[in-house]
Image (cartoon, helix red, strand yellow):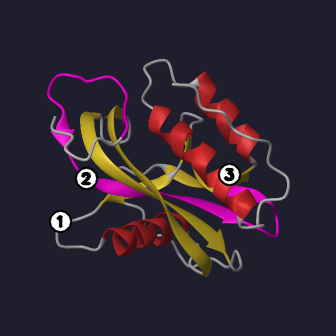
Amino acid sequence: MDNPDNIPEFGTKRENEERRDGGCGIVFDPLSQRYAVGLQENGLFRIFSGGVDPDEDMKEGVTREVIEESGLHNFLQIEKLGEVFAHYHNTLRNVNRVTKSTFFLFILENAELIPVQLEEHEKFHLVWVNAEELENNWKERNEDGDLDHWFYFLEKAVVLAKELGYDKTSKDIKFLR
């Protein structure tokens, strides 16, 4: 894989990786002091994410994915957290993936919901957790390093949400590479 931008790279390279670039959104509600995630059938908390077409603006595409998958749509602020290359096994589609992934922090104005538009393979539902619950859930399920890029961005999201004055309760997340 070429990495001309010298951005961080995570995960384990696998045979037959499919390339699909896209992004993820970490959603924070200042009122409840919790993060919105999807709870999969296997117990994994997942960040709302998806592929973004080459002609689609990355921020708009990730926002679309967050709205479609979570139903949350009233955002007070959206901040780019960064980009990574990630190698992982996509459990929902059962394929090995490599992606240049762009992450955003979404700060909610309110937690009003609209109906979700999950695709057939998306078997999860919205739940609210604190950063420590999210970190612990991932630690229990990260044997292959598939979630390393999520840890990296969770740390960045918590730091930024605290700096912006929204997150007043999370402990610091320290991702060790």
The Cα–Cα distance between marks 1 and 3, rounded to whole angstroms, is 29 Å
On screen, residue 159 versus residue 150, left or right, reads right
On screen, residue 81 versus residue 156, left or right, reads left
Given residues 64 and 173, the one toward you in this image is 173
Tell me where the magenta segment starts and ends, as one range. Answer: 8-35
- Mark 2 lies on a secondary structure that is loop
Q: Kindly identify the residue that appears in the image at 17 percent across and 22 percent down.
A: 15
* Mark 1 or 3, closer to the camera: 3
The residue under label 1 is 54
Which quarter of the rendering shows the N terminus? Answer: top left
Given residues 2 and 113, the one toward you in this image is 2
- Position of residue 97 measured from the top left corner of the image (x, y, whole percent): 26, 37
Please say if 141 is above or below 76.
Answer: above
The residue under label 2 is 21
Please say if 109 is above or below 132.
Answer: below
Dot 1 or dot 3: first in sequence order is: 1
Q: Which mark is residue 148?
A: none
Q: Amino acid at mark 2?
A: Asp
- Position of residue 5 measured from the top left corner of the image (x, y, whole percent): 25, 47
Q: Amino acid at mark 3?
A: Val
Quadrant in which residue 58 is drawn: bottom left
